[in-house]
Image: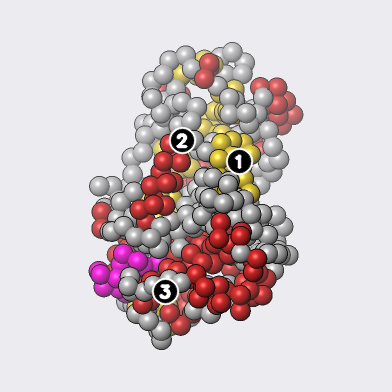
Amino acid sequence: MENNFDIDEVNAKATLFDVVDMDGGRIVAAEEYAENEYTALLQFGPSYWEGVETLKELYNKYKDQGFDIIGYASLGLDLFSAGEVRDFVEQNEFPWRNVLWDEDNLIHEIDPMWSLRNYYPYYSLPFVTVVDSSGDIAFYSDNLDKENQGLEIFLDEKLGGVAPPQYYTSTDYSADGRVSKLQSATEGDGIDVVMMGDAFSDRMIANGTYERVMRDAMEYLFVEEPYKSHRAMFNVYMVDVVSPNEGYEYGMKTALDTWFGDMTLVGGDDYDVTDYTRMALSEERMDEAMTIVMMNSTEYSGTCYLYYPSREGDYGSGYSISYFPMGSDKQVFRELLNHEANGHGFSKLADEYFYEGYGAMPESEKTGFREVSEKFGWNKNVDLTGDPTQVKWAKFISDSRYAGQGLGTFEGAATYFRGAWRPTDNSIMHDNTGGFNAPSRESIYYKMHKMAYGLGWHYFYEEFVAWDLSHRTRAAEGVSATRGVGVLRPSTPPVVRPYTWRELKPAGR
């Protein structure tokens, strides 16, 4: 699967740069673009990469037909040394010109975007961006597999005279926008979840594939406590979305313009997604809606987008959109769904994992963290103090009834190695396993009751504890600790939109 965006109708200009290559030659981007039919900017690193040989074949096949490659590897982020990059290039016999990119290699800064932290994504390797002779981006992918299929299809079509592959194309859009209620709340006012899919064709909706995917995802939402015991509080809607094509190969089009980015980052057109959500819900119920978009792909990815609520509150309010590929393993998918949608999207819990390389949380990040925590009741499972008597979950630490649940203050959270603390060593918000820890369960429980019974509902700690202790076994068990597939890649932190869903604008405006 190639992670390609449909940019046929977008004139996205490539960045301009003026650098020296590894052999001492000068490369001026504007001149290179003008001289070639297509120039590929290849970001690489000295790591295992099956696609080198196939990429060399494509280069040799089309280099005399107006195709060139400029490879660049970043230095200065403590990712690679110059020696590692040179050894990698020599061992693999890269036939194209290569740049050891660092801040000192810039001869003339033509484009302010050409800087170490603002060029094309540097966490996803390899990454290729193809630029035409006018300097417009014509193709890009961050998933060059060993066959480089998307790039090969593009070059064959543009330079080889080979017709692009023919994909199934939808013709019947009569079901588009149809709303079905998969579950009705029988307790309280109802908590709204709206589910839809992207890259599903008309025939996939007609033959029941679409609905099966949505129903499977709905079931996964209620496998963990407190969701399992409070399922009756939820309304679950399905909105049919008919896409032109059935996937994400080069040349395919989808209704919601969903895309794959670095690592596990995915997204789509939030404006269009919200329009479909409004087909299921009235405007007054939109502020607290949780929307889930299922992508027709076997990739492992998932990202939650959080919107500011219309008013301040203490229960994790605000509209959210979570994007997920279907994946290839049901157990792994339900773990990810509980982390992203139930953890981030519903209760606005923070990530409990961290990267050592990120170091300490910057003061600017702490300011934003405190603001949304205090105004909206977000991030109740992470604190910026490690004092067990002052931390948000101090009452659980001092409560003997919670002894044995591993509660304490563990430094490393919200992706940062220092300056943020989590309640337990592991949990769903850490590596997607082990269940929600006690502070997270309390946060979810609190929001469920506020939404189901209104803002006048009063919380009593002892009532929660009585419920929680009677469900502790199931909550502590969580999802199985043995994974269905290998080692998971790190999650992508939630993307916070500092405005409400009402302020969304159509793409391009």
Task: Specify the farthest residue to the bottom.
Answer: 186
- Left or right: 486 in relation to 292: right
Task: Give the Cα distance between marks 3 and 2.
Answer: 34 Å
In the rendered image, which residue does mark 3 sit on? 449
The kind of residue on which mark 2 rests is: Glu
Tell me the element at label 3: helix
- Identify the residue shown where x is 59% and y is 51%: 388
- Left or right: 318 in relation to 334: left
In the rendered image, which residue does mark 2 sit on? 363
Tell me the element at label 2: helix
Q: Count neighbours of disc 2 (C-alpha within 10 A) and say few if under 14, some if 14 to 19, many if 20 or more.
A: few
Up the image or down, 398 lies above or below 221; here it is above
Does 284 appear in magenta?
Answer: yes
Give the mark, 1 or 3, whose residue is nearer the N terminus: 1
- Image coordinates of residue 475 in percent, x first then y, are 62, 72
One can see residue 364 in this view: yes
Residue 127's tag is none
Residue 417's tag is 1
Task: Give the Cα distance between marks 1 and 3.
Answer: 34 Å
Up the image or down, 330 lies above or below 498; here it is below
Given this view, does label 1 or label 3 mark the residue nearer the observer? Answer: 3
- Identify the residue shown where x is 64% and y is 69%: 401
- Image coordinates of residue 209 in percent, x first then y, are 50, 76
Give the mark, 3 or 2, whose residue is nearer the N terminus: 2
Segment colored magenta: 280-293
